[in-house]
Image (spheres, rainbow, N blue to C red):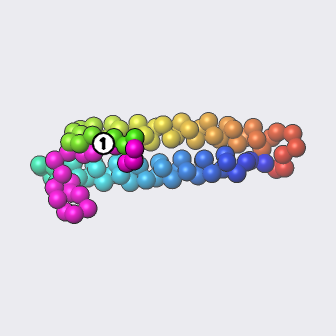
Amino acid sequence: MITEETATRIACAYREIANAEKLLEDVRKALDLAEPIDIRDVFGRRQQGLQLGVPSGRNGHRLFDVPYSLAIPVIEAHIAHHKAQIALLNEMAVSEASSKGGAA
């Protein structure tokens, strides 16, 4: 039987891929449609660049005005990373399912 942890990690990776693919689609549309780029924050203010950050808190860090040209490769790398994780997790799930004492 596959462990709950493995199943959860697989589901989370698939969800992350779906979210990233939607974001990638939105970014590509924004980059293709408008010149200059017209991406706005939640308050409707035009953004000069993107932000990249570690969640806020004591160790939080954020970069501002990250070039739009970096968005697509970063998102694509994120998707590739999670697809690779799914491949490994699928192998782990097969191993768990076929291990002694596991129910099928």
Furthest residue to the left? 36
Q: In the image, 97: left or right of 41? A: right
Dot 1 alpha-carbon crowd within 10 angstroms: few under 14, some 14 to 19, many 20 or more: few
Q: Residue at x 67, y 37 (%)?
A: 91
Q: In the image, 36: left or right of 3? A: left
Residue 37 part of the magenta-drawn span: no
The answer to whether any part of residue 18 appears in the image is: yes
Q: Quadrant of residue 65?
A: top left
Check the image and report above or below for 43 versus 29: below
Front-lying residue, 7 or 31: 7
**Secondary structure of the residue carrying numbered label 1:** strand
Q: Which residues are magenta?
A: 39-58
The answer to whether any part of residue 68 appears in the image is: no
Residue 46 part of the magenta-drawn span: yes
Relative image position of residue 1 (x, y in whole percent): 78, 48
Furthest residue to the bottom? 43
Query: Which residue corresponds to mark 1?
Result: 62
Furthest residue to the right? 101
Q: In the image, 103: left or right of 23? A: right
Q: Residue at x 27, y 48 (%)?
A: 28
Q: In the image, 2: left or right of 16? A: right
Relative image position of residue 100 (x, y in whole percent): 87, 39
Front-lying residue, 48 or 16: 48
Dominant secondary structure of the magenta stretch?
Answer: loop
Q: Residue at x 30, y 42 (%)?
A: 62
Q: Residue at x 47, y 48 (%)?
A: 17
Q: Amino acid at mark 1?
A: Arg
Label count reads 1
Relative image position of residue 8 (x, y in whole percent): 63, 51
